[in-house]
Amino acid sequence: MHFVAVLNKDGGTLRTTDLEAFVERSRERFAAEGHTMDAVIVAGRELVAALERASKDESVDVVIAGGGDGTASTAAGIMMNTDRVLAILPAGTMNLFARSLKIPLGLDAAMEAFATGRVQQVDIASANGKPFVHQFSIGLHAKLVDMRDKMKYGSRMGKMRASMRAAFTTIIQPPHVNVSIITDSSEIVARTTGIGISNNLFGEGHLPYADRLDQGILGIYITTARTTAEIIRFLLNLAIGRWKKNTKVEIHQTSALLLKVRGKRRKPYRCVVDGETSNLARETSIKIHPLALKVLVPT
């Protein structure tokens, strides 16, 4: 197979990696398995265009996208419902989509896995037509990301420290959202501090990511935590993947939903989609697209 690696030199661990040496090592490993590989090293602002070019190149079998969950989401949106195969090189902070795909988190280890990997079809979700691979959320998570992004940080550890500071403020001054969720079987009315909608259900016992991405369902997570102490317990349980015994979260599942803002507001709520924040529309249609994305996973 012929691989093209699109590497964002401004992002995550790639920023501090000797990319020329990394590419040469990867080429040698792919050649040992009978594959060929080209690499395109780009700045962040050039990433989308480079991914689009690679996805349209008929000589390319697999596009390797190097970055975090935002890069994974962008690349997946470009390649969903096509014959192109996507390989996620985990170079972000959390790499939650890569974790779902069981991809090793080290750069060289991930390339090693790709050289002997297999193609698998997985689900992808969308919110008002915008694809996402991991999660759409409002409330606590959106406020935390907005606050973190206003802080200055220049490294992965700096981003994690900024996230901790933003989390502290968010816990002390939590947002509240007033919405209804119309699923394929019911309507849920919620005034809450946070809602997450995931591409398949999160697994137990680890960070919030799905163990399987081929079940054709959306997970709906509504926190019932109100006080500071309740929110802290909820977030700690979230971090370790304690869902079944978490009394401060309601869990539902559906194949599609309509999220509607209730009441009048002068300022829109904020939402976060795979780490990218924006204003929440008055109505958001969220759907699962079963097996719409081809990915490369370890054998």
Image: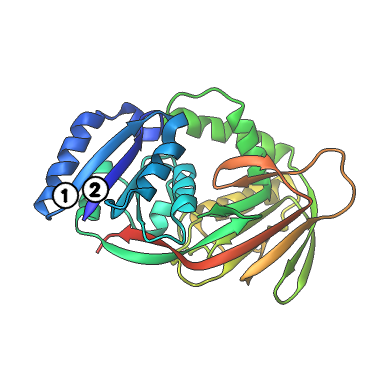
Q: Using the image, determine if residue 111 lies above or below residue 201.
A: above
Question: Is residue 233 shown left or right of residue 36?
Answer: right
Q: Using the image, determine if residue 201 lies above or below residue 240.
A: below
Question: Is residue 3 shown left or right of residue 209?
Answer: left
Q: Quadrant of the C terminus?
A: bottom left
x, y percentage for residue 219? 59, 65
* Image marks 1 and 2: residues in contact by CB distance under 8 Å: yes
Question: Is residue 153 shown left or right of residue 294?
Answer: right
Which residue, as the protein is rendered here, is positioned at the far front? Answer: 58
Please tell me which of labels 1 and 2 falls first in the chain. 1
Disc sitting over residue 130 in the figure: none
Q: Using the image, determine if residue 12 lies above or below residue 232.
A: above
- Tell me which residue sits at (43%, 54%) in the image: 79
Disc sitting over residue 111 in the figure: 2
Q: Which colour scheme appears in the figure? A: rainbow
Where, by quadrant of the figure, is residue 222 drawn? bottom right
Q: Using the image, determine if residue 222 lies above or below residue 71.
A: below
- The amino acid at mark 2 is Met
* Viewer can see residue 208: yes
Which sits in the foreground, 256 or 113?
Answer: 256
x, y percentage for residue 170? 68, 38
x, y percentage for residue 83? 37, 61
- Tell me which residue sits at (51%, 31%) in the image: 161
- Determine the secondary structure under disc 2: helix
Residue pointed to by mark 1: 30
Question: Is residue 91 shown left or right of residue 284?
Answer: left
